[in-house]
Amino acid sequence: MTTKIPVTLEGNLTADPEHGAGESGNEYARFNLAVNDRKLNESTGRWEDAGTVFHRVVVFNQQSRHVTDSLHKGDSAIVVGELRFGSYTDKETGQTRETRDVVADNVGASLKFAGATVNRVPKASGPAADASGPVAAPASYAGAGVAR
């Protein structure tokens, strides 16, 4: 049985995303997100950094290409997904190691301190992506009169 732990993170990329494809051909992008905790110093009245937690994030398929093309080191991002735990055997030491990854359902640029331009990508692929579809002119432009 798998426990799903939904998470929403806001932080900064520590490096450019790494893009690749798995053995099955599924595309992925991986990146680390630094989430800074801030607290108010009661004596000075100023906000101070209170620590940083680093999260490994992985995103799949078409979104992986968008993440790789759009986000870069230092950019602020918002990630929505689920926390997954795993384990592997270290090849050098033979010890079992544990992993914690966020598998992202949605990744976006944070607009808190920056602006962004959205470039829509067609959902369809192939010739259907460029099809314009039917075009209809309003009745007033088509020379038809409206009788009452």
Image (tube, rainbow, N blue to C red):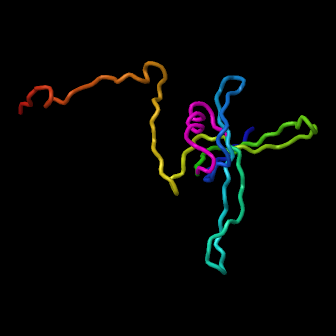
Q: Is residue 148 above or below residue 79?
A: above
Q: Quadrant of the C terminus?
A: top left
Quarter of the rendering containing residue 128: top left
Q: Quadrant of the N terminus?
A: top right
Question: Which residue extends farthest top?
Answer: 127
Q: Is residue 54 left or right of residue 47?
A: right
* Number of callouts: 0
Quarter of the rendering containing residue 137: top left
Measured as percent of width and height from the top left, residue 145 is found at 8, 29
Measured as percent of width and height from the top left, residue 52 is found at 71, 58
Quarter of the rendering containing residue 44: bottom right
The answer to if 102 sits in the magenta stretch is: no
Residue at position x 24%, y 26% in the image: 136
The answer to if 60 sits in the magenta stretch is: yes
Residue at position x 62%, y 51% in the image: 74
Q: Is residue 20 above or below residue 97?
A: above
Q: Which one is in front, 115 or 143?
A: 115
Measured as percent of width and height from the top left, residue 93 is found at 93, 39
Question: Which residue extends farthest right?
Answer: 93
Measured as percent of width and height from the top left, residue 5 is found at 68, 47
The stretch in magenta equals: 58-75
Question: Which residue extends farthest left?
Answer: 148
Residue at position x 41%, y 23% in the image: 130
Q: Is residue 146 left or right of residue 17?
A: left
Q: Which one is in front, 43 or 124?
A: 43
